[in-house]
Image: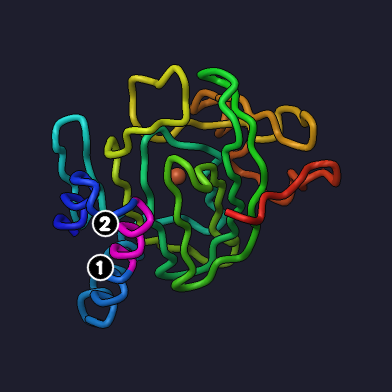
Amino acid sequence: MYPFLKELQQSKISVNEMQCAFLENLRKHQSDYDFWAKKLKFCMDKKTDYIFWREDFGGKDITVSLLYLEPGEVHPPHHHNNVISVQSVVAGQIWAREYHRIKCIDEDKILIAPVQERLMTVDDEILAHEWSKNVHWFAATNEKPAVMWNCNVRGFETDLFINPSPKSLGRILLDPHFKVVNGRFLAKSLSLEEAYAKFGDKPISNWPIPKNVVWETDI
Ligand SMILES: [Fe+2]
């Protein structure tokens, strides 16, 4: 994967081309059944994540891991500052909702539009970057745990959505349905504690998309 990071840095490939190359890499490695079975067993037995690769390049970094989710575990709604992510379900099922960022109002408020909502099964993917489907909210289904291959590339993008740009890279928790303004959701940043208190143990379906909100389908 490292050569693709280098090519991205040198502007030889686009962010989306790198995401597709990473996915291709993943699919190639998945054909090594024993390798994957062992890693998956580690996550399931220990009920924890497995880190394949984490490296800090000085203000930029990459983490490639398997993300373990307990049955019903919710990853509350969030967007990201300067993160390219590629996620693919490896085991179990994940209910996911994705939104697209439309406009930055200020450091703590953004306008967003829903893009899609679905039950993800093995090999289904979520791709996000600074300018595409950067808000997501997902949860393992109640019946069994789920594991997701998770690749986060932070700090590599130069054209950033949030203005003024936050100092820290990564996840910013949100109330995505704070208000509806002209058919868009006004989403407001939350602290980690606020986000888990509000969304942490509740199904995403508790927050249906109102009829007056416009979906963004052409992303
Ligand atoms: Fe995320």
Viewer can see residue 41: no
Kind of residue at badge 2: Tyr
Question: Residue 171 placed where, x, y %?
Answer: 42, 35
Query: Quick one: quadrant of the N terminus?
Result: bottom left
Secondary structure under badge 1? helix
Which label was assigned to residue 155?
A: none
Q: Could you tell me which residue is drawn at 40 percent across and 69 percent down?
A: 90
Residue 151 horizontal/vertical position (percent): 32, 53
The residue pinned by badge 2 equals 50
Q: Is mark 2 within 8 Å of ligand 1?
A: no
The part of the chain drawn in magenta is: 15-23
Contact (Cβ within 8 Å) of mark 2 with mark 1: yes
Residue to which mark 1 is pinned: 39
Q: Nearer the viewer, residue 102 or 33?
A: 102
Gap between marks 2 and 1 measured at Cα: 7 Å
Our reading of the magenta stretch's main secondary structure is helix
Which is nearer the eye, 166 or 7?
7
